[in-house]
Amino acid sequence: MDTYNEKGMTKSQWLFHTHEGRIDLRNGILAVVIAVIGLFPIYWMLQLSFKSDQETFGKIITYFPHQFSVSPWLQNLQDKAFLSSLKNSFINGFLTMAITIILGVPAAYGMGRYKVKGRNAFLLTFLVTQMLPASLMLTPMYLIFNKLHLLGTYFAPPIAIASAAIPFAVITLRPYFKSVPVSLDEAARVDGCTAIRSFFSVMVPAVKTGIITIVVISFLNGWNDLVFSMTFNVKENMRPLTANIYKFKNKYGTKWNCIMAYGSILVIPVIIMFVFLQKYIVGGMTAGAVKE
C-alpha cells in the first residue's frame, strides 16, 4: 500500500508530480534555447549597428560594442532619401491594409454567413492565388496598371500586394464569421438594426481578433514589399525602405554598421506591432459573446 508523506501525497502521486515537473523543466529549457537561437540574429544586427567602423572591421570579433557609436543611426535619420523611403514604406503598408480590410472583411462575411452560389469554386480560386509567385503576376499587372495610368503612383504597389492579401483575408476570416452564433445577428435584427449596422455593430466586434490579425499581416506585406515597388515605381523618390538598403555598398566597401542600423529601423515597427497586438492576435475569438 502507498504511504503518505509530509505533503499528504502518496508515493505514486509524488513520483507522478516529480516526473511532470521534470518534463516542464525540460520544455522550459528547450523553449529558452529556441528563443535564444531565434532572437540572436536580431541581437547581432542591433549590436553591430552601434559599433564604429574600426570595431566592425577589426580582427577580433566582439559580441558587444566596446566603442558605442550612434553615428550609423544618425547617418540614416539625417538622410532625406531615407526619410522619403520611410514615408513610402508607411504609405505602402497603410494602403495595403486599408484595401485588404475594406474588401476582404465584407467578402469573408458574405462567404461565411450566406450560401453563395459557387462558393467552393471561389475558395479554391483563393487558395490557388496563394501559391502563385509574385514574379508570375508582374507582367499582366504591369500591362493593366499601364492602361489605368497607375504606374509611377503610390496606388500601384498596394493594389498589387492586396491582390494576394485579400484572398488570404477571406480564407482566414471566413471560419471566424461562421463560428459567431447566429443568435447575435438575429438579436440585433430584432432590436431594429439593418444588415449593414448589424455587420458593423455586432459581427465586426465579435471577430475583432481575426481582423486585427489581418490588419497586422496586410500592413507587414506592404511594409516588406520589394518586387512590386521596384517594378511599378521607377522613380527613386517613390521607392520604399526595402529598395534602398543597397546604397551603403559601393566600390570602396560595405558600411555594415550603417546597413545594420538601416535594417534595425526597418524591423522596429514590426516588433512594436507584435508586442502591442499579440494579446489580440492570440486572444479568444468571441470572448464574452453568447454561445449556442
Image (cartoon, rainbow, N blue to C red):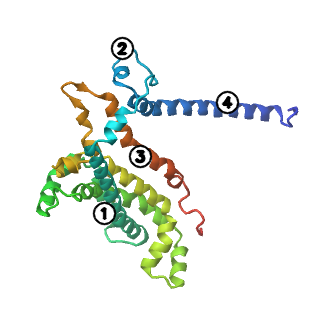
Give the mark nearest the N terminus, 2 or 4. Answer: 4
Figure quadrant of the C terminus? bottom right
Measure the C-alpha gap from mark 2 to mark 4: 44 Å
Residue at image location 54% in from the left, 74% down from the top: 184
* Residue occupying the far top of the picture: 59
Name the residue carrying label 2: 59
Name the residue carrying label 4: 22
Figure quadrant of the N terminus? top right
Name the residue carrying label 1: 122
Query: In the depicted view, which residue is nearer to us: 146 or 244?
Result: 244
Name the residue carrying label 3: 270
Kind of element beneath mark 3 = helix
Residue 70 image position (x, y, % from top left): 40, 33
Give the mark nearest the N terminus, 3 or 4. Answer: 4
Q: Is residue 124 visible?
A: no
Label 4 vs label 1, nearer the camera = 4
Kind of element beneath mark 4 = helix
Measure the C-alpha gap from mark 3 to mark 1: 32 Å
Q: Are marks 2 and 3 in contact (CB under 8 Å)?
A: no
Mark identifier at residue 200? none
Residue at image location 42% in from the left, 61% down from the top: 173
* Above or below for 195 versus 223: below
Measure the C-alpha gap from mark 4 to mark 1: 49 Å
* Above or below for 239 versus 94: above
Give the mark nearest the N terminus, 2 or 3. Answer: 2
Query: In the depicted view, which residue is nearer to us: 208 or 12?
Result: 208
